[in-house]
Amino acid sequence: MNVTPLVDVVLVLLIIFMVVIPAMEKSAQIELPGIFNVDEDPKGKTDPWTLALTTDGRMFFEQEELDQDNFRTKLNDALVREPARRLILRADRNAHYGKVRKLFAICQEIGFPGISLRVNELKDGKKQ
């Protein structure tokens, strides 16, 4: 039995999925800042929420874009649903630091049990 055509079809499908799946993700495209000594991600019962801030000031909670009027309500609702769930703040490396600090303070006021800043690891002076 000749399996070459079957392998060809499987490879074509694999390539199609490798191209299509990342394009389907609706999260904000953010270039994270980097550091050399990265803490390991703690493994818990639930994954933390993700709040993203883009260079132009747009905010995304998980996959949903938030506007300036309703983001506090969305964060409060999420905390009420799952009060033990932490929050990870992802901000683009070119985002204004004052906005990042202000957003971090707002998340603390809301009362999340833990807030982390997401960064990339640097090795030998180069971003990973």
Image: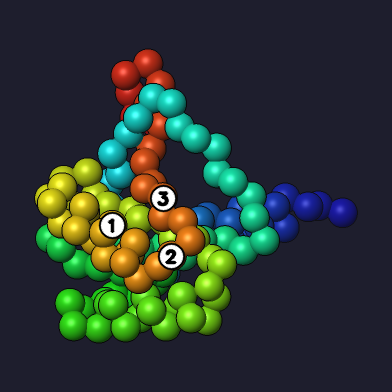
Separation of marks 2 and 1 at Cα, in angstroms:
10 Å
* Image coordinates for residue 120, horizontal then vertical, percent: 38, 37
**Label 1 near label 2: C-beta < 8 Å?**
no
Task: Give the quadrant of residue 61.
Answer: bottom left
Q: What residue is rendered at 34% in x and 61% in y?
A: 108
Res 116 label? 3
Task: Give the quadrant of residue 103.
Answer: bottom left
- In the rendered structure, the answer to whether residue 108 lies left or right of residue 39 reads left
Can residue 22 be seen in the rendering of this structure?
Answer: no
> Can you say which quadrant of the picture contains the N terminus?
bottom right
Query: Looking at the picture, does residue 36 appear above or below residue 73?
Result: above
Separation of marks 2 and 3 at Cα, in angstroms:
10 Å
* Image coordinates for residue 106, horizontal then vertical, percent: 26, 65
Q: Nearer the viewer, residue 13 or 105?
A: 105
> What residue did someone put label 2 on?
112
Of the residues shown, which amino acid type is indicated by label 3? Answer: Ser
Of the residues shown, which amino acid type is indicated by label 2? Answer: Phe
The mark nearer the N terminus, 3 or 1, is 1
The mark nearer the N terminus, 2 or 1, is 1
User: What colour scheme governs how the chains and residues are painted in the rendered image of this protein?
Assistant: rainbow
**In the image, which is nearer the foreground, mark 2 or mark 3?**
2
> What residue did someone put label 1 on?
104
